[in-house]
Amino acid sequence: MNIKAVQGDLKETEYRYIVEPCFEGLEFQEKSSGNNKDTLAKIGFTGKENTHAALPSGNSVRIYVGLGKREKFNSEIMRRSYSRAVRVTAEMGAKDIAIIPPAMENSAFETAYISAITLYEFDTYRAKKRKFAVENVYIRTDDVSGLKEGCTAGECTNFTREMANQPPSLGTPTLFENKAKEIKGLQVTVLGREDFIRLGMGGIEGVSRAAKEPAKMVIMEYKGSDEKPLLLVGKGITFDSGGLSLKPPDGMVDMKFDKCGAAAVLGVMKLASELSLKKHIVGIMALTENLPGGNAYKPGDILKHYNGKTSEIISTDAEGRLVPSDSLAYGIEKFAPSRVLDFATLTGACVVALGNIYAGMMGNDDSFMKELVDASRKTWENVWRLPLDDDFKEQISSKVADIKNTGGRPGGAETAAAFLSNFVGETPWVHLDIAGTAWTEPTTPHVGYLADGATGFGVRLIYEYLKQKQ
Ligand code: BES
Ligand code: MN
Ligand code: ZN
């Protein structure tokens, strides 16, 4: 699918489907649409949110997008309403869609972005391909660079979704390694089992012991400036069976999505490279399957992590905190980042607390967290701060090791973050628990632009955060 900028009018003789905005009270942006007022009123269209109307007009069809009350309008209302318009137009069988964006900040970016993510579907392994036949989206705008940027942000989000959606036997650590190596302008280093043992990375070594697919730590550096880097770490459990602390079947169904953190980091690296961002970013994906087996790590085992700390294994299903811990400690030592951010589908407890609406955010740096909240309000990839007082650490103290890998059910999201805090030292660090937001569930709000499966949560958020830092 191509997204192209068109300068000047979208002529009805040239475009069969034209989408245009309308505020509540039939307030049009296009003067000429005033002529259609009566017809639209007759069919009951007033421009309310979550409504649209399609009218024949000459040889083409006008799709009016209801934007609701002008005073209430914001970028998320825009994304939802335009997503709806793009979808209904696609459902009419359109090959080409022409779109008039609403007058707002970054309208070309937002229109391109929402078109790209609305039309994504995970159809790679289906004989019957795309539900939609859309080949071209034409957006009326003079902001060609904004459009290109929005298009790239959308495509990189879709790339993250595609990686995260891969079935567990195909979406392997090796696939992630290969995809990282395909991204231009990244310096990629890969550590494997022998390196884990040599370097004393007992967390990822332990969890990956019974894995059939070779485990990897994939380190990607994008150097668009000489500043200290931002370090991104992603949990990449390509399948989480729970290990010997085996999950019940119902709990295992969606565990191919346990690699969504790694997929988000990969998407951000691709975005940085494709937009040639003037930033220094290091991304680390901690990748392995978590499987049971004769050589699997066991409850009662004690693992020694890269920074020398030891952890007692209570549950092999609390693997998520063991794997990024070595990446955090290693990345901080090697790259001396100014800030560290990790993405992890870490706890069911976070889903219970925040549903499928907010990612849980915990960390050691107030201003870093505030900046992420600001970015998240813009992109609607919502984050909500959960507490991380030192008192949570007591819950994971161990009699036989420095810490243990679970602290029981109370405060499950917080004790998981407390575990990770052992590996970041004084470096400003934020942890995002994306267990509830990384893929859709029946309880996910129906925003229109997210097809079933992985959401790509985090890619646009980090891009917005980086832009604010400029
Ligand atoms: N990958 C899961 C977390 C998860 C569960 C994400 C459900 C999304 C939906 C993680 O590895 C895990 O199993 N966590 C356990 C931790 C517990 C054993 C302390 C959990 O949350 O139940
Ligand atoms: Mn688990
Ligand atoms: Zn997991």
Image: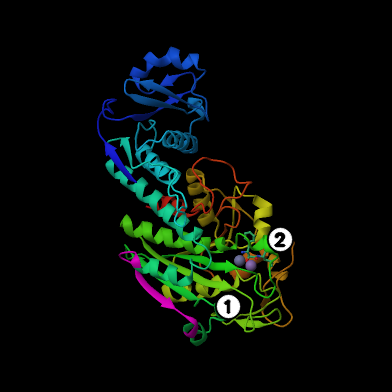
Q: Position of residue 371 (x, y in %)?
A: 49, 51
Q: Is residue 147 above or below residue 100?
A: below
Is residue 194 visible in the rendered structure shown here?
yes
**173 horizontally vs 100: left or right:** right
The earlier-in-sequence mark between 2 and 1 is 1
Labelled disc at residue 293: none
Work out whether residue 175 or residue 228 is closer to the camera in this orientation and state it.
175
Q: Amino acid at mark 1?
A: Gly
Identify the secondary structure beneath mark 2.
Answer: loop
Q: Is residue 189 magenta?
A: yes
Residue 55 sits in which quadrant?
top left
**Other-residue count near label 2 (Cα within 10 Å), few / some / many at <14 / 14–19 / ≥20:** some
The CB of the residue at mark 2 lies under 8 Å from ligand 1: no
Q: Position of residue 394 (x, y in %)?
A: 72, 70
C-alpha span from label 2 to label 1: 22 Å
Q: Amino acid at mark 2?
A: Gly
Identify the secondary structure beneath mark 1.
Answer: helix
Image region (quadrant) for ligand 2: bottom right
Q: Position of residue 101 (x, y in %)?
A: 37, 33
Work out whether residue 16 or residue 68 is closer to the camera in this orientation and state it.
16
**Other-residue count near label 1 (Cα within 10 Å), few / some / many at <14 / 14–19 / ≥20:** many
Labelled disc at residue 203: 1
**Pointer 2 residue:** 411
**225 horizontally vs 335: left or right:** left
Residue 256 sits in which quadrant?
bottom right
Q: Is residue 452 magenta?
A: no
- The magenta region covers 182-194
